[in-house]
RNA sequence: GGCGGCAUGGCCAAGUGGUAAGGCAGAGGACUGCAAAUCCUCCAUCCCCGGUUCGAUCCCGGGUGCCGCCUCCA
């Protein structure tokens, strides 16, 4: 199967060929750890988790590197506000990020490098850039007040790198014109477009020794140094959010090629933004939700499913309505899988992992679905197509579960169940024990409906008992009336031959 | 001001130079005491105007609208 990936560099979907046959090196820009991550971050890392899973499933050996930026202006500022040192701040938020990723079933990257443990590599790379004449050293802006005057900044000389801006597709002239007022003018820079590779230490800041005195790395150089260290100077794929295209990735390209004398990442993948009311979710706008905010209200599988329903290149709008819909979809699928497991109990191993279907021949709709699932992922990781490929088998499963003993239905149940497990491995949804997830989602909804301390639950129990008696008495009018009262309380009734069960009414979409 | 992206049924969302996946909602049906759940069936000509083409939603040009980037950002 041919793997096709959209490359920001060429603005085209290209046939992807790894530099080394059968092996793929992938670097994804991680988070700056000064706060909890928001759902926009979740979108990026869930997506690359699927990329990584899909590539491995296609038989590639994948080396996946995702960094933490643990030295940065925002970190320093936040630590000061909190009156804690940077190290304790970043340690805390790295742990929080790992918790979030685990909740979302993102597998760990092969390497998660920290800036603070790669200072020698960074210094070495800057030295090379300076040696090749692509950067210059200027005295710290504090030089006049610093009696020793030994600390210096190092700036990348954009004018010496003609290809600068190739990724974002903008010329340096373009940048000059509309340069925002955020750009501080600095007379020590040859061009205002020049960016810091090394920043001279200010009192109280994290600092390391270097040929330019005490200081710390600039924002962009870390990713260059860490990607080259862990993946080599030439590697296959580099990714992140669209907002990193400029300046971060343009700068990475410039400084890396300046240092290496040539190579760097071949393919560039950038995710569209997660939006709120069609506006970019970002910390500066304040219109964001942290991952943990969202997970307090929705099941992680629902969030993950939601994030996969839009192609990664497009913007995706975040809303309660969308999450509620995702919740009901995920619940619906897991309920069918739970029912399938009940039917298959003792006949076929169930639970996590890829199942080996043991009953009969594989129905063609399962074969077709699997083919489409894999093709969708090979075609620029189209997770919406991949999810859509599951619809027909899930419908067939629902139908077969109505009459599990009818001819051919056991085969369908067995093979669709196995297909779901395989899809779960690829996408990271539908891979858990179904009964457990169903219970978790319903329990979450129950707690929202009846917060602790609420006495409504007793009321519900009483109504349920009364209705059960009315049904025994075949007093249908009374039973329906009670069902209406329960519905008012947000309780949905399901009658069956074995009695009635209830569950919280999950919020309706579009109401 | 410069650069770029998007525009598909009530909502969400795939996709293709030859008359448009999937989901939600809606309608009808099966099932049910009635419902719910589940299953079946039905439900679009792809922002506007030109052009290229035998043929365009998909290619080109123009327009309108929305969004993003222009050195904090996933």
Image (tube, coloured by chain):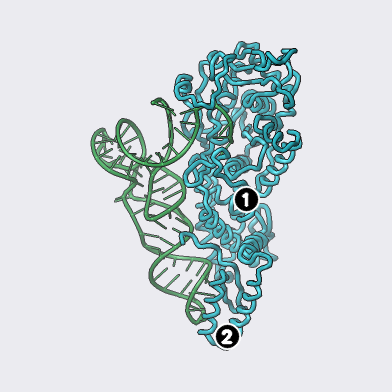
Q: Quadrant of residue A160?
A: top right
Query: What residue sits 54% from the left and 18% below the top?
Result: A192
Q: Dot 1 lies on which element? A: helix
From the top left corner, tell me how far across and down residue A213 is, in percent: 73, 16
From the top left corner, tell me how far across and down residue B21 is, in percent: 44, 53
Residue position marked by numbered label 1 in the rendering: A293
Please report, as a chain letter, where disc 1 is located.
A
Question: How many residues crowd around disc 2 within 10 Å: few (fewer than 14), some, or many (20 or more)?
Answer: some
Residue position marked by numbered label 2 in the rendering: A470
Query: What residue sits 63% from the left and 63% below the top?
Result: A442
| A405 and A208: which is toward the camera | A208
Chain A colour as displayed? cyan
Query: What residue sits 64% from the left and 36% below the top?
Result: A31
Please give the label number shown on residue A150.
none
Chain B colour as displayed? green
Q: Dot 2 lies on which element? A: helix
């Amino acid at each position: 199967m041919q793997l096709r990936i959209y490359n920001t560099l060429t603005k085209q979907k290209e046939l992807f060929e790894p530099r080394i046959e059968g092996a793929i090196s992938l670097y994804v820009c991680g988070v700056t750890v000064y706060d909890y991550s928001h759902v926009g971050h979740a979108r990026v890392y869930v997506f690359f988790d699927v990329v990584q899973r899909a590539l491995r499933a296609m038989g590639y050996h994948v080396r996946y590197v995702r960094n933490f930026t643990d030295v940065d202006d925002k970190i320093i500022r936040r630590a000061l506000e909190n009156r804690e040192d940077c190290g304790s701040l970043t340690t805390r938020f790295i742990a929080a990020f790992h918790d979030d990723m685990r909740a979302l079933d993102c597998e760990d990257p092969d390497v998660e490098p920290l800036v603070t443990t790669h200072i020698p590599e960074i210094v070495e790379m800057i030295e090379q850039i300076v040696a090749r004449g692509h950067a210059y050293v200027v005295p710290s802006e504090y030089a006049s007040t610093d009696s020793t005057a030994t600390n210096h900044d190092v700036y990348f000389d954009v004018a010496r790198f003609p290809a600068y801006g190739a990724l974002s597709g903008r010329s340096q002239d373009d940048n000059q014109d509309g340069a925002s007022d955020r750009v501080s003018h600095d007379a020590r820079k040859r061009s205002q477009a020049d960016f810091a590779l090394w920043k001279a230490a200010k009192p109280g800041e994290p600092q390391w020794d270097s040929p330019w005195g005490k200081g710390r790395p600039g924002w962009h150089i870390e990713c260059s140094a860490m990607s080259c260290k862990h993946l080599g100077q030439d590697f296959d794929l580099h990714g992140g959010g669209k907002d990193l295209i400029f300046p971060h990735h343009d700068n990475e390209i410039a400084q890396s090629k300046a240092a290496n004398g040539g190579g760097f990442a071949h393919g560039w993948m950038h995710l569209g933004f997660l939006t709120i009311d069609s506006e970019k979710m970002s910390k500066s706008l304040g219109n964001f939700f942290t991952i943990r905010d969202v997970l307090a209200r929705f099941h992680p599988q629902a969030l993950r499913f939601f994030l996969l329903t839009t192609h990664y290149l497009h913007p995706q709008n975040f809303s309660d309505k969308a999450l509620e819909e995702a919740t009901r979809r995920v619940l619906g699928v897991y309920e069918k899988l739970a029912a399938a497991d009940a039917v298959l109990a003792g006949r076929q191993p169930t639970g996590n992992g890829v199942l080996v279907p043991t009953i009969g021949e594989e129905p063609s709709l399962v074969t077709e679905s699997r083919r489409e699932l894999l093709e969708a992922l090979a075609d620029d990781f189209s997770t919406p197509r991949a999810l859509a490929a599951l619809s027909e088998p899930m419908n067939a499963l629902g139908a077969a579960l109505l009459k599990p003993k009818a001819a051919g239905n056991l085969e369908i149940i067995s093979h669709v169940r196995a297909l779901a497990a395989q899809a779960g491995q690829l996408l990271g949804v539908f891979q858990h024990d179904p009964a457990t997830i169903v219970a978790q989602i319903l329990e979450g909804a129950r707690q929202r409906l009846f917060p602790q301390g609420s006495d409504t639950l007793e009321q519900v129990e009483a109504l349920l008992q009364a209705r059960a008696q009315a049904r025994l008495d075949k007093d249908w009018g009374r039973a329906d009336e009670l069902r209406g009262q329960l519905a008012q309380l947000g309780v949905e009734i399901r009658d069956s031959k074995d009695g009635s069960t209830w569950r919280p009414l999950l919020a309706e979409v579009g109401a």
